[in-house]
Image (cartoon, grey):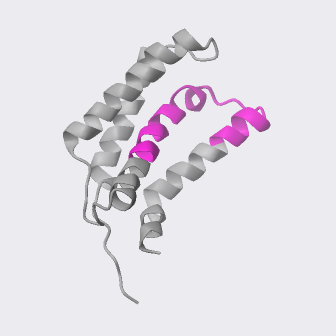
Amino acid sequence: MEKWLHFRNIWFLLFSVLFLLHLLFERLLMIRIPFADNYLDPLLFMPILLHCILWEQRFIFKKGLNFKLGTSEIIIWLIIISILTEYFFPKWNLGFTADIWDVFPYGLGTIFFMLFMNKPIIKIDQ
């Protein structure tokens, strides 16, 4: 049960719900909010992805509840995702648009993760 504590992180839950709500508004209800449509997904993507990578390291690779991702590893993920989403995906699929400005929300989301989410889990015994 300990491994599911990781997903009770308030920021992870908030960003995941916000991401899903945005998808609902944008894709199903056809409600467009231009700024959110352009930059909300890249902003939320990095903290969600990095949090899942952190979970993987802690529980699949058994690095423990105190493990944190290193700064260099986080920056490498930011670079990989930026190159994939802004260079390769638009070349492979016309549904993707290359927009260098998306790198800034990826960076902001990454900084947010580093400051507020990349923390050891504190277990509270009941």
Residue 73 forms part of the magenta stretch: no
Which residue is located at x 30 percent, y 41 percent?
A: 111
| Direction bottom: furthest residue | 126
| Residue 17 point in image, percent of width and height | 59, 52
| Between 82 and 3, the one nearer to me in the picture | 3
> Looking at the rendering, which quadrant does residue 55 occupy?
bottom left
Write down the region rendered in magenta.
22-50
* Horizontal relation, residue 44 to residue 17: left or right: left
| Residue 119 point in image, percent of width and height | 28, 59
* Horizontal relation, residue 58 to residue 49: left or right: left
> Looking at the rendering, which quadrant does residue 19 occupy?
top right
Mark yes or no: residue 99 visible.
Answer: no
Which residue is located at x 42 percent, y 39 percent?
A: 46
| Residue 44 point in image, percent of width and height | 48, 41
| Residue 108 point in image, percent of width and height | 35, 36
| Between 10 and 77, the one nearer to me in the picture | 77
Residue 38 forms part of the magenta stretch: yes
Which residue is located at x 39 percent, y 53 percent?
A: 56
Magenta span dominant secondary structure: helix
* Horizontal relation, residue 102 to residue 92: left or right: left
Mark count: 0
Which quadrant is home to the C terminus?
bottom left
| Direction front: furthest residue | 61
In this rendering, is residue 25 above or below 10? above
| Direction right: furthest residue | 29
| Between 89 and 9, the one nearer to me in the picture | 89
* Horizontal relation, residue 35 to residue 104: left or right: right
Mark yes or no: residue 77 visible.
Answer: yes
Which residue is located at x 48 percent, y 32 percent?
A: 42
In this rendering, is residue 102 above or below 12? above
